[in-house]
Image (cartoon, coloured by chain):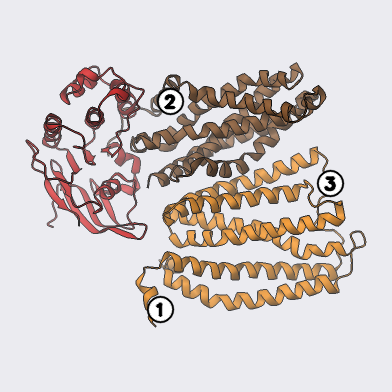
Amino acid sequence: MATWTWFHKLASPPYLYRTAGRLLPWLAIPAIVLTLAGAYGGLVRAPADYQQGEAFRIIYVHAPSAWLSLMAYTVMAAAAAVGLIWRMKLAHALAAATAPIGASFTLLCLATGSLWGRPMWGTWWVWDARLTSQLILFFLYLGYMALHSAYDDTQRADRAAGLLAVVGIVNVPIIHFSVYWWNTLHQGSTVLRADGPAMPPSMLVPLLVSFAGYTLGYAALACVRLRAEVLGRERNASWLQELGRG
Amino acid sequence: MPETPAALLEAENLQLWRGTRHVLRGLSFHVAAGESIHVRGPNGAGKTSLLRTLAGFLWPEEGRLLWNGADVSQDRDGFAADLAYLGHENALKADFTPLENLRYATGLRHPPTAGTFESVLARLGIGAQQDLPARVLSAGQRRRVALARVVLARARLWLLDEPFTNLDVLGVEALSGVIAQHVAAGGIAILTAHADLELPGISPRRLELT
Amino acid sequence: MSTLGTGLGRAAWLVFERDVRLAFRRWEQVTHPVVFFVMIATLFPLALSPETSLLRDIAPGVVWVAALLSSLLALETLLRADLEDGTLEQLTLSGQPLGWLLFAKTLAHWVLSGLPLVLAAPLVATALAAPGDAVGVLMLALFLGTGVLSFIGAVGAALTLGTRRGSVLLSLLVLPLAMPVLIFGARATDLAMRGEPAGGALMLLGAMLALSVTLAPIAASTAVRISLE
């Protein structure tokens, strides 16, 4: 079937390796430009918030990393599901490549949330619903990586950890809901809001640019890590040895 | 290999990798009803991997396995209902007696009929131990209980991984008799063993793995 | 392909009965988690203070953390012994749907490890100065919650079967997934102790139980097949 050709092509390691390599500059350069533009717009050009002052500017790092932490987990779970259902090894490679990136962005989100909390709440950590569910998400990433590294055989590692990612994505909404429910009942502190209703364009535009920059940055990092995964998995394959000679 | 119309089990171009090791390299064979196969080869040649692939534990990267002309990956449980597998472990609970072990293991497949457990155990030479906890049985006796489970599974395809381990001369004789009867009734037995064995009453076809 | 003479119900009963009878011959498998549960609860008055008002405040959290940890401890026995003696291979090849058999196994595990906690709960609650009329809700919440923990835990136990360092890894995988149970369970207990209706939290626990009972055996059967590779 012609429509499935691209799918089968992606299942071929040399094709995927080359495609990811070709895509890389097209993702990395816009990612760098947009991230820098977003940072400039957010940190320099945007006015200070009338309530939070200069501290609000951390949102230009915090909100995009929060978005990526969830998006990367979704990508990871979707790739793992494809790998489990169609026994497609390279989908698992994408999932394995994504996990550390997602975990890093989750950690970045937690760190910036904590930094923001210091001037706002006067303490480094508050059991805010968003931060708490990010923390649990971080644990889920750690679980995936721990299970993956516990198996010696890459294929079993892929499939076991992939199943955990799929179970995790079913649980993410439940965890999210339960943590919010817990937080409102305990009348926790104010929620760090990414979506102020009256955000002027001078604040909003750099934020959107940052979102785009970070997302492309994730894609570029995923390409790099995916290539590394393919190299590691195919280290005995003939096409790689030819590539090394040629 | 010429196509045998009566082939019950067909393996086509099985390719199996274990990590970076290419274990089965394009293995093809046909087995007809009433045949027995002795899988031979040195340690690490993939005898156990082959049996575990046939049992459906391992998935070959390429190739297919046909049972009665149908691809077994389409109906795993249906194929499992037709096969009995004896692995390295005997799957016995040490706290249960042989009779209790058989009741739970074969009960999952067929409701027990009165007296069959006892008669099969007696045939394999462990009738006297049927009410002792499996913990106190010797390794050879436990192997015989596991073989009784295979006999009682009422399966056409027997996959026996090193069935003669720990068996004494009488045990080998009893097992050979059981296999001969199974094959004569139109069943298939595929077994592995390092050594050449004199198996009274059966002359299995050899399948060499290198 | 042949069909089996044993129906689904009979097959599930056999698996359930086998595990329960085995547990009665290995009694410590049932008693150790309960003793652990009571001991964890004992640690808190010793570590904090025996003051009744404080104990009453922390009682819901203490009971649920103790229940969560002793459920985790018990999970080790769910599948590992069956993997090591080859029983799991035979269950996979029984011709019966593996998910269904694992459902029966997990149910037996719940009866053997969860129900004893429910029965020990009044003791722990009294020791932590919880009011007597909250004990009913606590037991009901624990009944539902330990069920969810058993079924979610079954997936984790199946996933870690193929690894050598199983138990710490198992906790690492299961604890984040179990946090909603902790939240709803402790909340239901807390509400009951304040004399407020706990129906909402109990219903959420029930919903989680329904979800995990239906989905977890499917995931666990996939995980068992991966572990047997």
| Tag 3 secondary structure | loop
Given residues C144 and B200, the one toward you in this image is: B200
Please indicate whether residue B38 sits to the left or right of residue B15 in the image.
left
Q: What residue type is labelled 2?
A: Asp
Please indicate whether residue A53 sits to the left or right of residue B72 in the image.
right
Residue C73: horizontal and vertical position, in percent? Answer: 55, 33
* Chain C shade: brown
Q: Can residue A3 be seen in this view?
A: no
* Chain A shade: orange
Residue A104: horizontal and vertical position, in percent? Answer: 64, 60
Q: Can residue A13 be seen in this view?
A: yes
What chain is tagged by disc 3?
Answer: A
| Tag 2 secondary structure | helix
Given residues B7 and C159, the one toward you in this image is: C159
Q: Name the residue under label 3.
A: A189
Residue B36: horizontal and vertical position, in percent? Answer: 14, 43
* Chain B shade: red
Which residue is depicted at the point 69% across and 34% down?
C184
Which residue is depicted at the point 57% across and 21% down?
C116
Q: In which quarter of the image is residue B26?
A: bottom left
Query: Which dot marks residue C19?
Result: 2
